[in-house]
Image (spheres, rainbow, N blue to C red):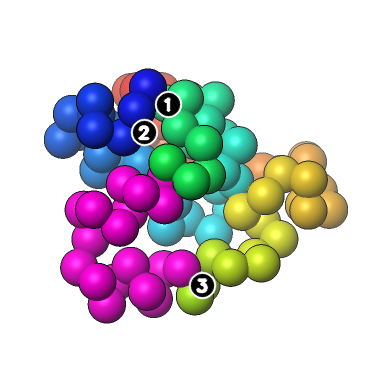
């Protein structure tokens, strides 16, 4: 799926997952088919510029946002409304 093909509800969920520290980009790709660069495009398009910059600063090199950099598998976070998508 391409970022411009998403409906409002899906965009909100992608943004929510992207803000969560423990949700890796790979989980977003699995659930919505969006690669990291697509998530960045969604965030850039649908957030205020200052909020986008703050988010990019937070997630840059954050180990928990990339599955390969994570040092744990057990105890990963699962949102209570994840099953809705």
Residue at 25% of width from left, 43% of height from top? Answer: 12
Q: CA distance from mark 3 to mark 1?
A: 22 Å
Instruction: Give the x, y percent position of residue 17.
Output: 42, 46
- Predominant SS along the magenta part: helix
Q: Nearer the viewer, residue 49 or 17?
A: 49
Sequence-first tag of 2 and 3: 3
- Residue 80 in sight from this viewpoint: yes
Whether the residues at callouts 2 and 1 have beta carbons within 8 Å, the answer is no
Residue in the picture at 47% in, 25% down: 33
- The residues tagged by marks 2 and 1 sit, at their Cα atoms, a distance apart of 15 Å
- Residue ID for mark 2: 81
Q: Count every numbered label the image shows and give the total.
A: 3
Q: Is residue 29 above or below residue 59?
A: above
Task: Name the spot of residue 52 as percent of width and height, x first.
Answer: 33, 67
Of tags 2 and 1, which is closer to the observer? 1
Picture coordinates of residue 2, whole percent (x, y):
34, 28
Q: Which mark is residue 58?
A: 3
Residue position for label 1: 32
Work out whether 54 lies above or below 63. Answer: below
Q: Is residue 52 magenta?
A: yes
Crowding at label 1, few (<14), some or many (≥20) Cα neighbours within 10 Å? some
- Based on the displayed image, in which of its 4 quarters is residue 38 positioned? top left
Q: Quadrant of the C terminus?
A: top left
What segment is highlighted magenta in the picture? 39-56
Horizontally, residue 36 falls left or right of residue 76, namely: left
């Amino acid at each position: 799926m391409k970022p411009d093909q998403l409906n409002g509800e899906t965009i909100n969920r992608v943004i929510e997952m992207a803000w969560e520290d423990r949700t890796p980009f790979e989980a977003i790709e699995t659930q919505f088919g969006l690669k990291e660069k697509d998530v960045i495009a969604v965030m850039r398009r649908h957030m205020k510029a200052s909020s986008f910059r703050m988010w990019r600063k937070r997630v840059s090199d954050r180990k928990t946002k990339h599955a390969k950099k994570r040092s744990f598998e057990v105890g990963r976070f699962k949102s209570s409304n994840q099953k809705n998508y």
